[in-house]
Image: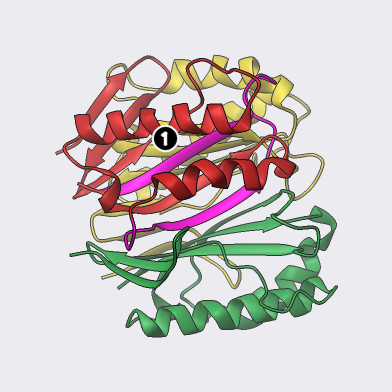
Chain colours: A green, B red, C yellow
Amino acid sequence: MITRYETGARMSQAVKANGFVFTAGQVAADPVPSVAAQTAQILAQIDALLADAGTDKTRIISASIWLADIAGFAEMNSEWDKWVPAGDAPARATVEAKLATPAYLVEIAVIAVA
Amino acid sequence: MITRYETGARMSQAVKANGFVFTAGQVAADPVPSVAAQTAQILAQIDALLADAGTDKTRIISASIWLADIAGFAEMNSEWDKWVPAGDAPARATVEAKLATPAYLVEIAVIAVA
Amino acid sequence: MITRYETGARMSQAVKANGFVFTAGQVAADPVPSVAAQTAQILAQIDALLADAGTDKTRIISASIWLADIAGFAEMNSEWDKWVPAGDAPARATVEAKLATPAYLVEIAVIAVA
């Protein structure tokens, strides 16, 4: 069975299937000009999506992080490191990429166990 | 069991395992200089790969899209939005990245339920 | 059950769950200024991570490759093509992206069947 969450014409914000939950790439709902603030918003959005899908951040197995400017790496990590549960950090890859609009400084997608 | 499709020395175009199908990043077989035209070709290639693997676009759970120039976002979406089945949109992340050759304007990889 | 390997405060280098192993994006432990040399190191690191998780490169189903400069595509492939087991090549996507530090020329993450 495939369960989709917040499904629109273009994408779903999360999809559950075969014991996994895949989130869409999350960007800040309010893209204030701060890498840390956008990261904090995104991580809260991920918490909410995982809760909707019946799981949580202790069960994330993989994360993809895109930074509009890799110079924001440490600032993004300052929020990330506070948020990751001790002992349950996922595999992760972080690279620089321009995002859908210049206002977006960070985008994060995760895969969790359902 | 792992089943591989269109397997060469470098990559397979799709691989099925544990109830999922992963496609390779698809680029247009005929990279005409149009984001819309390349997107349409890629989506048809994905349809064909999923059919080979015994599934279809209603069962895609996650898509990764790379645009050589993020300015092509709306043009890519014009094809994407027509193609995505109503109610079955996958999770998705779209970022800008230079691709293997400058002729490639779009690349798309998907994960589907088998 | 979720099993994490080389887990720190920020990430795990690999995570096993639901019959899959996801590695973190691997960068060269010794980032000498050579795409080929970094690629060879990364592929050896992936071999070691997969061995820790009880699997190996014949069971990789998907690979994500980032090159700091896409001009290194052929040089990366020279190592990749030697390493991939005949008949067992994974799905793959390769794009250009700036990585965490300028010394890193290549980053590779894989998903394997456990």
- From which residue to which does the magenta span run? B86-112
Instruction: Answer with left or right where residue C104 lies relative to residue B37.
Output: right
Instruction: Answer with left or right where residue A86 lies relative to residue A38.
Output: left
Task: From the top left corner, tell me how far across and down residue C19 is, in percent.
Answer: 23, 55
For the point 40% across and 44% down, the residue is: B83
Question: Does residue B96 appear in the picture of this structure?
Answer: no
Question: Does residue B15 appear in the picture of this structure?
Answer: yes
For the point 43% across and 19% down, the residue is: B10
Q: Image quadrant for the C terminus of chain A?
A: bottom left
Say which of A47 and B64 sits in front: B64
For the point 72% across and 48% down, the residue is: A97
Task: From the top left corner, tell me how far across and down residue B46 is, in percent.
Answer: 36, 34
Task: From the top left corner, tell me how far across and down residue C61 is, in percent.
Answer: 33, 38
Say which of B70 and A72 sits in front: B70
B74 to C108, vertically: above or below = below
Q: Amino acid at mark 1?
A: Leu
Q: Image quadrant for the N terminus of chain A?
A: bottom left
Q: Quadrant of residue B70?
A: top right
For the point 19% across and 49% down, the residue is: B18
Badge 1: residue crowd in 10 Å (few <14, some 14–19, many ≥20): many
B89 to B28, vertically: above or below = below
What is the chain identity of the residue bearing mark 1? B
Instruction: Answer with left or right where residue B54 lies relative to residue A70.
Output: left
Looking at the rendered structure, the secondary structure element under dot 1 is helix
Say which of B91 and A75 sits in front: B91
Q: Tell me if residue A16 is in the magenta stretch.
A: no
Q: Which residue is mark 1?
A: B43
A65 to B51, vertically: above or below = below
Instruction: Answer with left or right where residue A53 lies relative to residue A105.
Output: left
